[in-house]
Structure formats: C-alpha cells, structure tokens
Image (cartoon, grey):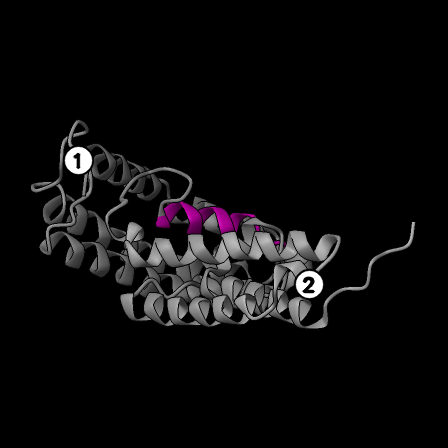
Amino acid sequence: MIEQPQHAGLAALADEFFDAENTHNPFDATLSGVEGYAHLVPDPSRAAAHRHREALLGFTARLAAIPLDSLAGEDRITHRVLARLLANGIGRITHGLAEFSVSATIVAPQNEAFSALAMTSIDQEGADAYLDRLAALPDYFDAVLRRTLDAAAEGRRPLRSGVDAAVAQLEAHLATAPAEDKLLRPLAGRPESERALAIVRGAVRPSVDRILPGQAQGLSPGAGPDDKAGV
C-alpha cells in the first residue's frame, strides 16, 4: 500500500497545536503517555486560559486557510479532527467550565495532579523533572483555589456535592503520614526520595491543607444543590 504524502502545512500545524496543548496542560500529556512535559504543571489562571484561547483561535484561522477539499487520505481526517479539537478547546475556555467544576472526579485538578505524578515514568523523564513538577504543585493548587473562589464570588458556583467530595478526598490524602504520601512512590528507593519527602512535607501538603478551608468555607456555603446544576 502506497502512503499518501502529508500536507506539509497541515502536519506543521498539527505539531504546533499538540505542543501548545501539552504545554498548556502537561498533566494531560503525562496521562496520555506523551513524554517531554513531565517537568511542567499547568497555569490554571484566567490569564493563561485566555492566552491559550488566542493561540487556539490562531490555529483555527491557519486551519481554515487549508481547504479540506484540497486534501486526500489521512490528511482529511487530520483536518477534521483538528477542527473539532480546536472548537472544543475554545468552547471550554470561553465558557469557563474549569472555574466551577469542583469535584473528586478524574478530571478534578487535584486528581489530575496526583494521577499525573503517579504515572510519571522516572526512567524516561528523569528524577529532576519529577522534582521540578513536585515543587511547583503548591503554586498550582493555590491558583486553582483562587480561580474557583473568584468564580464563586461572581455567581458561578459549584455543586455542594462536588465540593464535599473534593474536601473529603483531600482530607483522606492528608490523613496518610507524609512518608507514605503517594506522590513519593515514583521515587521510592532512589537517592532523590529524601528531597522529594522534604518538598512534600514542607510545601505540597501545606498547600493541600490551604485548599480545605478555602473550599469548605469559601465554596460550600453558597454551593448549589444537585437538582440546580445550571450555571
């Protein structure tokens, strides 16, 4: 079977899009098995989201300049998939879904962080990358809390059941001893494990402890019931 040649502009656009997407949410990159982003954590601020939206709009304009009818084979599929991914990404940011979706589900910020770090391949990514990401978690958690509190103050409030579940999950995480924190597992038995424990004990767990009163006191009182989940 003879492979169809790729459209050079479309291939370059796809590469740039996926790099921008993985840089914007490197946790997703790790969870998807994409290497090279394990030293990064997302910037959950509105400003970062708006910058990424502008980048996605730019990609959309470039994609529109490549007529679908001019493509053949897999390039046509690439074009249509890119169009859908770009539209979905722009929509998520435009409607601020991350601002009020407080929960204990797999897409919750704390779960993405815990899961992404737990799935990091130290042999491939390196211990230094893991330690850099671990040290950046406190700022990430603080920024997530600020954004949800800002949204709640504007009337974009989460569901009470989601907030309660998130609080219970974070309390369960802190109920384990620091030396047994699951964030330490990827470095178990390695010389960097003591440095990781110092980061977890001195920075990460205190930041998780800050989220609890922020959610319990700042979000729970005005959170909505499950039968009124509209925005």
Please indicate whether residue 227 sits to the left or right of residue 63 in the image: left
Give the farthest residue toward the left.
Answer: 221
Q: Please report the residue visible at 14 percent of the width from the left and 31 percent of the height from the top.
A: 225
The percent coordinates of residue 24 (x first, y second) are 45, 65
* Residue at the spot of label 1: 160
Asked whether disc 2 touches disc 1, contact meaning CB atoms under 8 Å apart, the reply is no
* Residue at the spot of label 2: 70
Q: Please report the residue visible at 48 percent of the width from the left and 70 percent of the height from the top.
A: 61
The percent coordinates of residue 44 (x first, y second) are 33, 62
Quadrant of residue 54 in the image? bottom left
Magenta region, residue range: 109-121
Give the farthest residue toward the top.
Answer: 227
The 10 Å Cα crowd at callout 2, few under 14, some 14 to 19, many 20 or more, is few
The percent coordinates of residue 178 (x first, y second) are 39, 49
- Say if the magenta span includes residue 119: yes
Front disc: 2 or 1? 2
Above or below: residue 205 compared with residue 38: above
Q: Could you tell me the amino acid type at mark 1?
A: Arg
